[in-house]
């Protein structure tokens, strides 16, 4: 009798977990109204005042406005539209708005995993929503990274919708190309952190174009359509904006005058350079001597060496992926199947993890785009053991705790220890993921892993 009762209750548990994942950010905000990054939210409040005065002049009148236009719109613009002028009264409504964005990301993750036929998709989407890594750096913090993540989620949903349909339809294909260009443009206009994800999204889009178009003329036409769809929103936004004479686009202004994070080795984040630098928050342009005992071997400059390693690692990743999908192309595949899409989500996660490991200037919240995608990828791919997923859940929870420690200054009691743990854990995770990926690609030479 007890077994029968448990079997009847079990299907409902996953839906309860999903609901909990949707609600947890709002609950945290209600229980901890003072748990937010006052400086970031204060910046957005000041942007809202400049937005209200004249949004067309925001990059002239507002010296601290260093996000692209869409990022400014979904932060300062939204605050202005809320109609609350006092800072102490705007914080909670703004964070609840961010909590809604977090909830939409959970629903999007559920939609993606359902299409990828992940078992217990509602449960896993809820788990992703419950993880502190999913909301501590966004709605709890008072930051807008969830908006950029939602655009990535929309892209993946669109990718699955086009490819898993499996029917040759030129109208659907060109709609995909146009929407992909627009989504990448909007993501570019949201926040600088998302540019790393665009490296992977751009590759996925080009891969889809090559697989479906096949003829050189069709590929060229698709590229032109994609380029127009990407550039048009940027030009349309630039047209009404007033800029200082030295700048032809607000993106140029933002990239030229934004904060120079890369000039430090790490700013309360982690990377491989924090293990060998005397001061983990020192200048990334100062050479670090590598020694064997007391014998100097050579020196490295974290800033330039980090860029080199990041580009090298991701060039090798692209080569492996391109070689794998070229085999699918030669076998006549025109569409990606669920396993292929999970592999590409893994690529997106690896790009985000690799820049945290190798580039100088990493910040405490830069790992935000890694965890939802790596968890979805591992669940969608059969060659990863469930133990890895559990390890990732533990890592995501600890990462969220570190962010909490930053907000509450609790980390000061532990010095560099939390960041060292993050560095070691994520270095091992990266190596394991690369090893597993290489092994999979080697063993899949004769495996038909595509839909035609």
Image (spheres, rainbow, N blue to C red):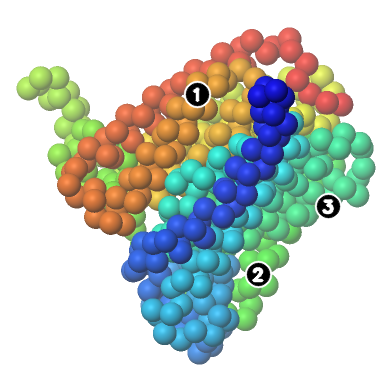
User: Which is more N-terminal, label 1 or label 3?
Assistant: 3
Secondary structure under badge 1? helix
Q: Residue at x 86, y 37 (%)?
A: 165
| Residue where numbered disc 1 is placed | 388
How far apart marks 3 and 2 lie (CA) works out to 21 Å
* Classed neighbour count for the residue bearing mark 1: other residues with Cα under 10 Å, few (<14), some (14–19), many (≥20): some
Q: Is residue 80 above or below residue 415?
A: below
Label 1 and label 2: CA atoms lie apart by: 44 Å
Work out whether 37 lies above or below 309: below
Q: Position of residue 381 (x, y in %)?
A: 64, 24
- Left/right of residue 342 with respect to residue 401 in the rendered view: right
Residue 108 against residue 29 in the figure, above or below:
above
Mark on residue 369? Answer: none
Compare marks 3 and 2 and give the one earlier in the sequence.
3
Residue at (73, 10) in percent of width and height: 446
Residue 324: percent from left, percent from top: 67, 22
Residue with the mark numbered 2 = 235
Q: Residue furthest front?
A: 1
What residue is drawn where x is 39% and y is 66%? 33
First of labels 1, 2 by sequence position: 2
State which mark lies toward you, 1 or 2.
1
Assign the N terminus to one quadrant of the image: top right
Question: Element type at marker 3?
Answer: helix
Q: Foreground mark, 3 or 2?
A: 3
> Quadrant of the rendered structure where residue 114 is?
top right
How far apart are the alpha carbons under marks 3 and 1?
Answer: 37 Å
Closer-to-camera residue (355/15) = 15
> Image check: 76 left or right of 304?
right
**Numbered circle sitting on residue 175:** 3
Q: Position of residue 28 (x, y in %)?
A: 45, 57
């Amino acid at each position: 009798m007890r077994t029968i009762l448990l079997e009847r209750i079990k299907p409902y548990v996953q839906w309860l977990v999903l609901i909990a994942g949707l609600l947890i950010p709002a609950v945290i905000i209600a229980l901890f109204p003072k748990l937010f990054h006052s400086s970031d939210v204060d910046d957005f409040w000041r942007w809202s005042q400049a937005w209200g005065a004249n949004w067309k002049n925001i990059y002239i009148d507002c010296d601290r406005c260093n996000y692209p236009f869409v990022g400014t719109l979904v932060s300062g613009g939204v605050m202005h539209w809320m109609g609350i002028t006092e800072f102490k009264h705007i914080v909670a409504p703004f964070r609840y708005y961010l909590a809604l964005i977090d909830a939409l990301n959970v629903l999007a993750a559920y939609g993606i995993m359902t299409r990828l036929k992940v078992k217990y998709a509602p449960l896993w989407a809820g788990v992703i929503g419950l993880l502190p890594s999913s909301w501590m750096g966004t709605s709890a913090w008072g930051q807008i990274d969830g908006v950029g993540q939602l655009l990535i989620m929309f892209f993946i949903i669109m990718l699955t919708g086009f490819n898993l349909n499996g029917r040759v339809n030129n109208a659907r294909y060109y709609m995909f190309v146009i929407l992909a260009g627009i989504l990448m443009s909007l993501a570019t206009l949201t926040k600088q952190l998302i540019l790393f994800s665009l490296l992977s999204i751009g590759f996925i889009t080009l891969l889809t174009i090559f697989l479906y178009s096949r003829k050189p003329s069709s590929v060229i036409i698709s590229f032109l359509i994609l380029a127009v769809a990407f550039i048009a929103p940027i030009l349309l936004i630039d047209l009404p904006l007033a800029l200082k004479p030295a700048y032809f686009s607000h993106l140029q202004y933002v990239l030229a005058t934004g904060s120079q994070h890369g000039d430090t080795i790490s700013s309360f984040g982690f990377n491989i350079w924090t293990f060998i630098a005397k001061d983990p928050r020192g200048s990334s342009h100062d050479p670090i001597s590598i020694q064997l005992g007391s014998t100097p071997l050579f020196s490295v400059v974290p800033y330039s060496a980090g860029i080199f390693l990041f580009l090298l690692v991701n060039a090798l990743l692209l080569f492996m992926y391109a070689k794998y999908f070229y085999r699918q192309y030669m076998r006549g595949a025109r569409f990606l199947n669920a396993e292929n899409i999970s592999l590409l989500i893994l690529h997106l996660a690896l790009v985000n993890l690799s820049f945290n490991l190798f580039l100088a200037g990493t910040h405490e919240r830069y790992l935000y785009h890694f965890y939802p995608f790596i968890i979805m990828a591992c669940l969608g791919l059969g060659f990863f053991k469930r133990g890895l997923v559990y390890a990732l859940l533990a890592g995501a929870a600890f990462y969220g705790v570190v962010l909490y420690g930053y907000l509450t200054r609790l980390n000061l009691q532990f010095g560099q220890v939390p960041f060292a743990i993050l560095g070691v854990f994520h270095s091992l995770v990266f190596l394991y993921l690369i090893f597993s990926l290489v092994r999979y690609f080697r063993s899949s030479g004769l495996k038909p892993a595509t839909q035609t």
